[in-house]
Amino acid sequence: MATTFLTLVNDTLKRLNEVQLTSDEFATAIGFHASVKDAVNIALEEIGQEQFGFPFNHQTGSLTLVAGTSTYAAPSDMKVVDWDSFRIVKDEAENIGAVRLRQINYDTYIQRFYIVLSVMKLHSALSQTKPTLSTTITTSIRLH
């Protein structure tokens, strides 16, 4: 069941044994009723800052990967990343299937992939051409 700001304010007023607001009175509330509106709004803001899992905090985005680039900057307003949501999007033109990407720690990255990336960079520098692998990564990220 959807809850509106008016409903939350009226539930609070009801618990305080105060007269509830109508939708006509809500925008022009003064005094105690205005204070309750402010208090509910502040509580919602604090919950949104502390508890990132709420659906209204969820955003998705995509990032085009470039061959030879191993790190990318995150959006400045990002607070939490849902690492389990990273995937490579299917690209029939490049004959790439959809793949879920798993998070690995930095030591594993160095052990498994750093040497491969170094060889690719060396090969690219020697041949004066960049590798042509390019794909898109789409992820669900929670921004707060």
Image (spheres, rainbow, N blue to C red):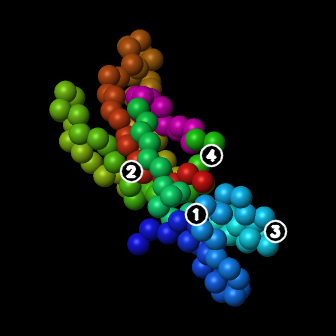
Closer to the chain start, of discs 2 and 4, is 4
The residue that appears at 63% across and 42% down in the rendered structure is: 76
At label 4, the amino acid type is Asp
User: Which residue is pictured at 81% across the width and 68% down the height?
Assistant: 31
Instruction: Give the magenta part as a residue range.
Output: 65-74
Measured as percent of width and height from the top left, residue 25 is found at: 65, 63
Question: Callout 4 environment at 10 Å: few (<14), some (14 to 19), or many (20+)?
Answer: few
Type of residue at label 3?
Gly
Of the pair 40 and 9, the residue shown nearer to us: 9
Residue found farthest to the front? 24
Per the image, label 3 sits on a secondary structure element best described as: loop
Mark 4 lies on a secondary structure that is: loop
User: Alpha-carbon distance for marks 3 and 1?
Assistant: 17 Å
Q: Which of marks 3 and 2 is nearer the N terminus?
A: 3
Give the mark toward the camera: 1 or 4.
1
Q: What residue type is labelled 1?
A: Ser
Residue density around tag 3, few if under 14, some if 14–19, many if 20 or more, within 10 Å: few
Q: What percent of the width, then of the height, locates residue 142?
A: 51, 54
| Residue hosting label 3 | 31
**Are the two marked residues, 3 and 4, in contact with CB atoms closer than 8 angstroms?**
no
Q: Name the residue under label 4.
A: 77
Find out whether the residues at labels 1 and 4 contact each other: C-beta distance under 8 Å: no
Per the image, the residue denoted by label 1 is: 23
Magenta span dominant secondary structure? loop
Depth check: give the residue in front, 93 or 41. Answer: 41
Tell me if residue 68 is in the magenta stretch. yes
Q: Mark 2 points at which residue?
A: 86
Residue, far right: 31
